[in-house]
Amino acid sequence: MSTSHPVAPESPRYRYTVLAMLVLVYTFNFIDRQIVGILAVPIKADLGLTDTQLGLMGGLAFALFYTLLGIPIAVLADRRNRTVIVTVALVFWSAMTAVCGFAQNFWQLFLARLGVGVGEAGGVAPCYSLVADYFPPHQRARALAVYSFGVPIGSALGILFGGFIATHIDWRTAFIIVGAAGVMVAPIFKMVVREPKRGRFDAPQARPATPAGIGEVMRMLARKPSFWGLSFGAAASSMMGYGLFFWLPSFLVRSYGLSLLEASLFFGTILLFGGIAGLWLGGSLADRLGTARRRMYAYIPAAAFIATIPFYLFGVTSPSLVVAFFLLLVPTGLGLVWLGPVLSSIQHVVPPNMRTTASAIFLFINNLIGIGLGTVMLGVLSDVLSARFGADSLRYAILAGTSFYLVAAALFLLSARRLERDWE
């Protein structure tokens, strides 16, 4: 059994230190997840890959084991020490990222990316649960939004460092350096972050004494239609989100003639500033408006998704790189507004002893569809359109992909109708 070390709610400094460590681990999660996007240009040239192969490697190779193993690892995390599980996961996925640097062909790189997915399967759902046990309900959307800063920070750093190292050294060294850095962070995380008491901010009657099995969690979620609407809505948005994370650097190189380093600086800056602003906006609005009306946790991201469409339309087609920068900055932020409200909702539609497993089921749906299909979808569309549009094929593939934000908004609006009743 795990050993719990309850931490007094009156220790905000330690709570924020824990949150900072969780953000650091999530940052490495996304550096390792997204670095292949900026390295796609030199990898394609070196290994002679097609856009479809790049999409499979960047999406399906990672998503396959990441999603399949996430649920059993989460069931274990609902019973055992979550900080130990996160530490082991960080070491494994970082080591496999370093292994990517030694790949000599498509299949070797594909298998190494499978390994990264295996490791990262234990790195997110337990952290959602830890955040819920370190912050009270009225602060959870903001806390989970701050935790999600790891998405834009990690993606931006992966793109910036990957582009710099690939330009001045080579793409293999980029994988090795980033992987080694993650391994070194793991023992620091384990020393700093203690395992909190589960459900310590929840009412006593909401804290079941025994861990829940996967069957019990599934029966609970079967009675929560809002969970499924939010999960599939998030997955639809992630098809576009992950697809853009992977392909936008290549789009900038092909359609605007930027160098790899220039593309990494351009997109990294957009991700960093736009992403953080969007995450904080979503978390703040949800905590402020959602206390009185739970359905706002779904309405806020739905509105944000709809608002992205005109910005992508004019941003991707703009002949001016400067205009494109400011137009793309806005939808990059709006596309991440959903994380704080939705992740908080997932923690609240089940009791504390089910949170990690429910989060893993959510991630299974979101990432299998979002990562597994989004990246390869844009790659296939680009290959299909290349006969007509040549180097500009990615531009039109991205425009077609924005329709998934509309699907996401529709599913969120439907979920809002049941969220009030499903809230625990």
Image (tube, rainbow, N blue to C red):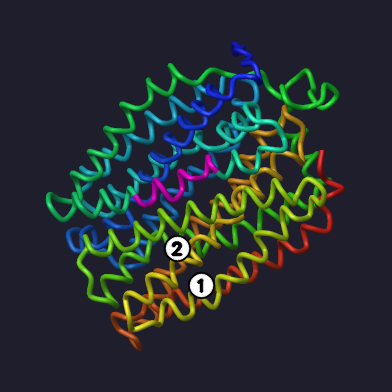
Above or below residue 268? Residue 382 is below
Give neighbour class at mark 2: few <14, some 14-19, many 20+ (Cα, 10 Å).
many
The span picked out in magenta is: 146-156
The residue labelled by disc 1 is: 401
> Camera-side residue: 109 or 207?
207
Q: Is 75 on the left-hand or right-hand side of 334? A: right
- Residue bearing the label numbered 2: 243
**Residue type of the residue flagged with mark 1:** Gly
Residue located at (25% from left, 50% from top): 162
> Quick check: 370 above or below 179?
below
Q: Secondary structure at mark 2?
A: helix
- Residue 101 is drawn in which quadrant? top left
Tell me where residue 61 appears, x and y as whole percent.
41, 51
User: Is residue 23 left or right of 337 when viewed as pictured?
Assistant: left
Name above or below for residue 423 compared with residue 384. Answer: above
Q: Quadrant of residue 27?
A: top left
Name the amino acid type tagged 2: Gly
| Secondary structure mainly formed by the magenta segment | helix
